[in-house]
Amino acid sequence: MDFKSFLRAKRESLGYSQNKFAKLVGITQSYFNSIERGEVKNPPSSEVLIKMVEILGLSDSEGEKFFYLAAIERTPNIILDKLKKLTKEVNTNNISDNSIPLFERISAGLGTFTEEDICDYISIPGLKTTENVFAVNVQGDSMEPTIKNGSIIICKKEIELRNGEIGAFFINEEAFVKRIKISKEYLALISDNPNYPPIYIGPGEDFKVVGKVIKVVSDIN
Protein backbone atom coordinates (compact mmCIF):
# COMPACT_ATOMS: atom_id res chain seq x y z
CA MET A 1 0.00 0.00 0.00
CA ASP A 2 1.39 3.40 -0.96
CA PHE A 3 1.18 6.66 1.01
CA LYS A 4 -1.90 8.11 -0.69
CA SER A 5 -3.86 4.84 -0.37
CA PHE A 6 -2.91 4.48 3.30
CA LEU A 7 -3.91 8.08 4.02
CA ARG A 8 -7.22 7.78 2.18
CA ALA A 9 -8.14 4.49 3.88
CA LYS A 10 -7.44 5.87 7.37
CA ARG A 11 -9.30 9.12 6.69
CA GLU A 12 -12.37 7.34 5.30
CA SER A 13 -12.39 4.86 8.20
CA LEU A 14 -12.90 7.84 10.53
CA GLY A 15 -15.66 9.28 8.37
CA TYR A 16 -13.82 12.48 7.50
CA SER A 17 -14.47 14.20 4.18
CA GLN A 18 -11.49 15.66 2.36
CA ASN A 19 -12.72 19.16 3.20
CA LYS A 20 -13.12 18.48 6.94
CA PHE A 21 -9.81 16.65 7.23
CA ALA A 22 -7.96 19.41 5.37
CA LYS A 23 -9.41 22.03 7.74
CA LEU A 24 -8.33 20.01 10.79
CA VAL A 25 -4.81 19.72 9.39
CA GLY A 26 -4.72 23.38 8.44
CA ILE A 27 -4.27 23.08 4.68
CA THR A 28 -6.53 23.77 1.71
CA GLN A 29 -8.81 21.07 0.33
CA SER A 30 -7.29 21.42 -3.14
CA TYR A 31 -3.80 20.80 -1.73
CA PHE A 32 -5.00 17.80 0.29
CA ASN A 33 -6.82 16.44 -2.76
CA SER A 34 -3.58 16.61 -4.73
CA ILE A 35 -1.84 14.70 -1.91
CA GLU A 36 -4.38 11.87 -2.03
CA ARG A 37 -4.15 11.74 -5.83
CA GLY A 38 -0.37 11.51 -5.64
CA GLU A 39 -0.05 14.60 -7.84
CA VAL A 40 1.32 17.09 -5.31
CA LYS A 41 4.38 19.01 -6.48
CA ASN A 42 5.36 20.15 -2.99
CA PRO A 43 5.20 17.16 -0.58
CA PRO A 44 3.65 17.89 2.84
CA SER A 45 6.07 19.15 5.47
CA SER A 46 7.01 17.22 8.59
CA GLU A 47 4.70 19.49 10.60
CA VAL A 48 1.76 18.63 8.35
CA LEU A 49 2.54 14.91 8.53
CA ILE A 50 2.74 15.02 12.33
CA LYS A 51 -0.63 16.79 12.44
CA MET A 52 -2.13 14.11 10.17
CA VAL A 53 -0.85 11.35 12.46
CA GLU A 54 -2.45 13.05 15.47
CA ILE A 55 -5.82 13.53 13.76
CA LEU A 56 -5.86 9.99 12.40
CA GLY A 57 -4.99 8.63 15.86
CA LEU A 58 -2.32 6.32 14.49
CA SER A 59 -0.50 3.92 16.80
CA ASP A 60 3.30 4.07 17.06
CA SER A 61 3.72 1.31 14.48
CA GLU A 62 1.15 2.86 12.15
CA GLY A 63 2.85 6.24 12.55
CA GLU A 64 6.21 4.73 11.58
CA LYS A 65 4.63 3.17 8.51
CA PHE A 66 2.94 6.48 7.66
CA PHE A 67 6.24 8.41 7.77
CA TYR A 68 8.03 5.65 5.84
CA LEU A 69 5.44 5.71 3.05
CA ALA A 70 5.62 9.51 3.00
CA ALA A 71 9.39 9.32 2.59
CA ILE A 72 9.00 6.88 -0.29
CA GLU A 73 6.49 9.27 -1.88
CA ARG A 74 9.10 12.04 -1.77
CA THR A 75 11.88 9.90 -3.25
CA PRO A 76 12.53 10.53 -6.98
CA ASN A 77 11.43 7.70 -9.27
CA ILE A 78 14.92 7.25 -10.67
CA ILE A 79 16.20 6.37 -7.19
CA LEU A 80 13.21 4.13 -6.42
CA ASP A 81 13.73 2.23 -9.69
CA LYS A 82 17.40 1.70 -8.83
CA LEU A 83 16.53 0.46 -5.32
CA LYS A 84 13.93 -1.95 -6.73
CA LYS A 85 16.48 -3.30 -9.19
CA LEU A 86 19.09 -3.81 -6.47
CA THR A 87 16.54 -5.43 -4.15
CA LYS A 88 15.40 -7.77 -6.90
CA GLU A 89 18.98 -8.79 -7.60
CA VAL A 90 19.55 -9.59 -3.91
CA ASN A 91 16.27 -11.53 -3.67
CA THR A 92 17.03 -13.47 -6.84
CA ASN A 93 20.42 -14.51 -5.49
CA ASN A 94 18.78 -15.77 -2.30
CA ILE A 95 15.98 -17.76 -3.94
CA SER A 96 15.94 -21.40 -2.83
CA ASP A 97 14.64 -24.31 -4.88
CA ASN A 98 11.33 -24.38 -2.97
CA SER A 99 10.68 -20.61 -3.03
CA ILE A 100 7.59 -19.18 -4.67
CA PRO A 101 6.88 -15.60 -5.81
CA LEU A 102 4.88 -13.38 -3.47
CA PHE A 103 2.68 -10.72 -5.05
CA GLU A 104 1.55 -7.64 -3.14
CA ARG A 105 -1.91 -8.01 -4.64
CA ILE A 106 -3.75 -9.88 -7.35
CA SER A 107 -3.10 -8.04 -10.57
CA ALA A 108 -3.00 -8.59 -14.29
CA GLY A 109 0.64 -9.50 -13.86
CA LEU A 110 -0.36 -12.84 -12.37
CA GLY A 111 -1.52 -13.89 -15.80
CA THR A 112 2.01 -13.74 -17.12
CA PHE A 113 4.08 -13.79 -13.92
CA THR A 114 6.05 -10.69 -14.83
CA GLU A 115 8.94 -10.13 -12.44
CA GLU A 116 7.97 -6.48 -11.97
CA ASP A 117 4.89 -7.54 -9.98
CA ILE A 118 6.81 -9.75 -7.52
CA CYS A 119 7.48 -8.12 -4.13
CA ASP A 120 9.34 -11.05 -2.53
CA TYR A 121 10.03 -14.78 -2.57
CA ILE A 122 8.96 -17.05 0.27
CA SER A 123 9.36 -20.70 1.22
CA ILE A 124 6.34 -22.67 2.40
CA PRO A 125 7.00 -25.93 4.28
CA GLY A 126 5.10 -28.95 2.99
CA LEU A 127 4.71 -27.90 -0.65
CA LYS A 128 5.28 -30.93 -2.85
CA THR A 129 5.93 -28.80 -5.93
CA THR A 130 6.39 -25.11 -6.66
CA GLU A 131 5.45 -25.34 -10.32
CA ASN A 132 2.67 -22.84 -11.16
CA VAL A 133 2.41 -21.94 -7.46
CA PHE A 134 2.40 -18.36 -6.22
CA ALA A 135 1.50 -16.39 -3.08
CA VAL A 136 -0.59 -13.24 -2.65
CA ASN A 137 -1.09 -10.84 0.26
CA VAL A 138 -4.77 -10.59 1.17
CA GLN A 139 -6.33 -7.31 2.27
CA GLY A 140 -9.91 -7.19 3.56
CA ASP A 141 -12.25 -9.27 5.71
CA SER A 142 -14.68 -10.63 3.10
CA MET A 143 -13.36 -14.20 3.54
CA GLU A 144 -13.09 -14.21 7.32
CA PRO A 145 -12.93 -16.35 9.35
CA THR A 146 -11.41 -18.67 6.71
CA ILE A 147 -8.92 -16.10 5.39
CA LYS A 148 -8.12 -13.32 7.82
CA ASN A 149 -7.13 -9.82 6.78
CA GLY A 150 -3.37 -9.68 6.29
CA SER A 151 -3.02 -13.40 5.53
CA ILE A 152 -1.05 -14.83 2.64
CA ILE A 153 -2.80 -17.23 0.29
CA ILE A 154 -0.94 -19.90 -1.66
CA CYS A 155 -2.47 -20.47 -5.08
CA LYS A 156 -1.88 -22.91 -7.89
CA LYS A 157 -2.52 -22.07 -11.51
CA GLU A 158 -3.88 -24.45 -14.12
CA ILE A 159 -5.87 -26.54 -11.65
CA GLU A 160 -9.59 -27.26 -11.74
CA LEU A 161 -11.81 -25.55 -9.20
CA ARG A 162 -14.79 -27.53 -7.94
CA ASN A 163 -18.01 -26.18 -6.51
CA GLY A 164 -17.41 -24.68 -3.06
CA GLU A 165 -13.65 -24.31 -3.37
CA ILE A 166 -11.78 -21.02 -2.88
CA GLY A 167 -9.88 -19.37 -5.67
CA ALA A 168 -8.51 -16.12 -7.03
CA PHE A 169 -10.54 -14.63 -9.87
CA PHE A 170 -10.86 -11.73 -12.26
CA ILE A 171 -14.20 -10.20 -13.22
CA ASN A 172 -13.81 -7.47 -15.81
CA GLU A 173 -10.19 -6.97 -14.67
CA GLU A 174 -11.22 -6.58 -11.00
CA ALA A 175 -9.62 -9.11 -8.67
CA PHE A 176 -11.39 -11.22 -6.05
CA VAL A 177 -10.58 -14.03 -3.63
CA LYS A 178 -13.83 -15.91 -3.09
CA ARG A 179 -15.52 -19.28 -2.85
CA ILE A 180 -17.01 -20.38 -6.16
CA LYS A 181 -20.64 -21.51 -6.41
CA ILE A 182 -21.56 -23.50 -9.50
CA SER A 183 -25.13 -24.48 -10.27
CA LYS A 184 -27.29 -25.08 -13.33
CA GLU A 185 -28.96 -21.70 -12.86
CA TYR A 186 -25.99 -19.46 -12.10
CA LEU A 187 -22.29 -19.00 -11.38
CA ALA A 188 -21.37 -16.88 -8.36
CA LEU A 189 -18.49 -15.93 -6.08
CA ILE A 190 -19.37 -16.23 -2.41
CA SER A 191 -17.77 -14.57 0.61
CA ASP A 192 -17.41 -16.54 3.84
CA ASN A 193 -18.19 -13.32 5.71
CA PRO A 194 -22.03 -13.07 5.65
CA ASN A 195 -21.84 -9.28 5.56
CA TYR A 196 -20.81 -9.44 1.90
CA PRO A 197 -23.40 -10.32 -0.78
CA PRO A 198 -22.72 -12.90 -3.52
CA ILE A 199 -21.21 -11.72 -6.79
CA TYR A 200 -23.12 -13.24 -9.70
CA ILE A 201 -21.31 -13.73 -12.98
CA GLY A 202 -23.49 -12.42 -15.78
CA PRO A 203 -23.37 -13.33 -19.48
CA GLY A 204 -20.79 -11.36 -21.41
CA GLU A 205 -18.64 -10.59 -18.37
CA ASP A 206 -14.91 -11.20 -18.64
CA PHE A 207 -14.47 -13.91 -16.00
CA LYS A 208 -11.11 -15.60 -15.42
CA VAL A 209 -9.83 -18.07 -12.85
CA VAL A 210 -6.35 -17.02 -11.70
CA GLY A 211 -5.73 -19.99 -9.44
CA LYS A 212 -7.01 -22.25 -6.70
CA VAL A 213 -6.21 -21.43 -3.07
CA ILE A 214 -4.38 -24.49 -1.73
CA LYS A 215 -3.11 -23.05 1.56
CA VAL A 216 -3.65 -20.04 3.85
CA VAL A 217 -0.76 -18.70 5.90
CA SER A 218 -1.64 -16.34 8.74
CA ASP A 219 1.92 -15.46 9.70
CA ILE A 220 5.32 -15.84 8.12
CA ASN A 221 8.43 -14.90 10.08
Image (cartoon, rainbow, N blue to C red):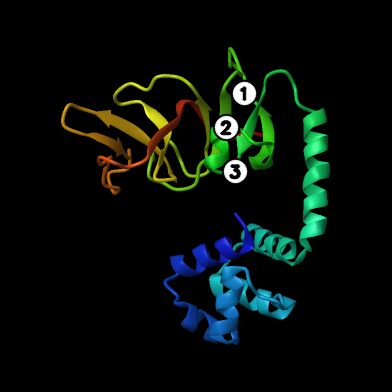
Does residue 16 lie above or below 215 as drawn? below
Question: Label 3's element?
Answer: loop
Report which residue position mark 1 lands on: 124
Residue 131's x, y, as percent? Answer: 60, 18
Instruction: Please state, as top left, top right, bottom left or bottom right, where the N terminus lies in the image.
Output: bottom right
Q: Which residue is mark 3?
A: 104
Name which quarter of the figure residue 188 lies in.
Answer: top left
Amino acid, disc 2: Ala
Name the spot of residue 205 as percent of width and height, x first.
Answer: 32, 42
Left or right of 39 in this view: 210 = left
Q: CA distance from mark 1 to mark 3?
A: 17 Å
Q: Which mark is residue 135?
A: 2
202 displayed left or right of 5? left
Q: Amino acid at mark 3?
A: Glu
**Which residue lies most toward the front here?**
204
Instruction: Quadrant for residue 116, please give it.
Output: top right
Q: Secondary structure at mark 2?
A: strand
Q: Position of residue 220 (x, y in %)?
A: 62, 33
Q: Residue placed at 68% from the left, 19% from the top?
A: 98
Distance between the Cα atoms at labels 1 and 2?
10 Å
Residue 62 as seen in the image, left or right of residue 211: right
Disc 3 or 2, which lies upstream in sequence?
3
182 and 122: which is toward the camera:
182
